[in-house]
Amino acid sequence: MNKNAYLSFFISLTFALGTTFLIGYFSFNYVYDMTEKELIESRIEANKQEALHMARLLAQKLKDGYTQQQVITEFQKSIQYTPTEKGFECMFNHKGVQLCHPDPAKIGQVIDSTNSVVSLMNNEQFKENFESVLQKGKPGGGVRSFLKKKFTEIIYVAPVEGSDLMLAVHANLVYIKNQLRDFREKLLFVFIISGLLMALVIFVFIRFLYIQTQHRNKFLQEEKMPLPESPADSVKPVSAVKPKVAQNRILANQGNKLVPLLTEDVAYAYIEYKLTYLVNHKGDKFTSNLSLEEFMEQLDPHKFFRANRQFIVSIKSVDKVEKYGNSQLRVRVRPEADREIIISKLKMADFKKWLGEQ
């Protein structure tokens, strides 16, 4: 792998990892924030439904003839010593007195203005004293923050119709936060794995494009058919070629031997895999260390013609010329070449002029 290939590899990898990091970072935070918000809102809604349902049941007992004290006593028996880690139910009156609680020691405590505040989820800037919420005797709730200790919970209170009782449903926000933390760790693991896979896919795709480009460039360089030529690349007309002294012979290779080969004996020359081959009129094949350009410089331009990037032909070897396609010519030579010799549209006029001079 050359220097350019290493550089391409490094750029591809950096781009893939950078793209993956940016996409993963914003996607992860968005998914986590949305999940946190929806989880808390769904918990508030669950507390609301539970509080309203229990308040209706207790109101029905009052309508059925139960006294308020009987309702309080039965409700306390149903919730006493129940676990409070995740959440619990309790009861207040409009004055803020704790009437029922899973922990009997808290019964009788009074909520005052220095106890806690409740902020609504849809309006976090608005905070209302929890004592005021109870005194209003209306359903409501949100996130309750205690003023004298660092503790928050989700709460919803619902009035019991026909009494001054306020049923409250609590959800421990710390427990919910712990759930979110576990979810965050799992989500982060999924994003890391998916990010690495995404980076791998991006990297493979970039490398594929790079390799395809390299192969295409190599194909164009080694292509047998002549590529479109600009006027600057085309062979100058014979009349414009400056007079020069042509070489009579060239030193060629045949096996392990060096052979002096008369240039007039060369029927045609061609290049294959960057090696120059010379074929004489008898069909014998030789090789040369010269490029086609260097070989052409030693030939008489009246007797030899550069047909295309791959071939030089001698006038003595031209057997016939045929039309090829809409705007090209095909040259048949003797001895027969094992590949086609094509004259492009740009060289056609020069080739005809060259033939006509003979």
Image: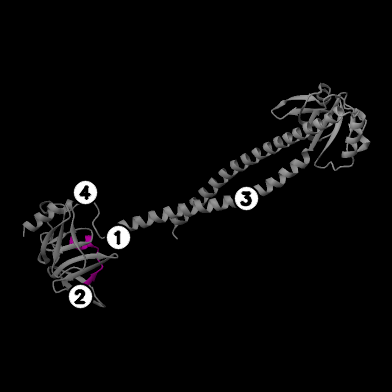
> In the rendered image, which residue does mark 4 sit on?
232
Is residue 281 visible in the rendered image? The answer is yes
At label 4, the amino acid type is Ala
| Mark 4 crowdedness (10 Å alpha carbons): few <14, some 14-19, many ≥20 | few
Which mark, by number, is residue 222? Answer: 1
Highlighted magenta segment, given as a residue range: 284-298
Q: Is residue 268 magenta?
A: no
Which residue position holds label 3? Answer: 190
How far from the left and from the top, in percent, is residue 259?
A: 20, 75
**Secondary structure found at label 4:** loop
Q: Earlier in the sequence, mark 4 or mark 1?
A: 1
First along the sequence among labels 1 and 3 = 3
Q: For mark 2, what is the residue?
A: 259
Q: Please state if 286 lies on the left or on the right of 199 as rendered.
A: left
Please tell me which residue is depicted at 90% across the width and 35% down the height of the picture. 74
Question: Going from the N terminus, do you reach mark 3 or mark 2 first?
Answer: 3
Task: Give the mark, 3 or 4, whose residue is nearer the N terminus.
Answer: 3
Residue type pointed to by label 3: Val
Q: Look at the numbered disc 2 and give the secondary structure of its residue.
A: strand
Nearer to us: label 4 or label 2 = 4
Which mark's residue is nearer the viewer, 3 or 4? Answer: 3
Residue density around tag 2, few if under 14, some if 14–19, many if 20 or more, within 10 Å: some
- Quick one: SS at disc 1? helix
Q: Earlier along the polypeptide chain: callout 4 or callout 2?
A: 4
Which image quadrant is residue 249 in? bottom left
Type of amino acid under label 1:
Glu
- When asked about the image quadrant of residue 45, the answer is top right
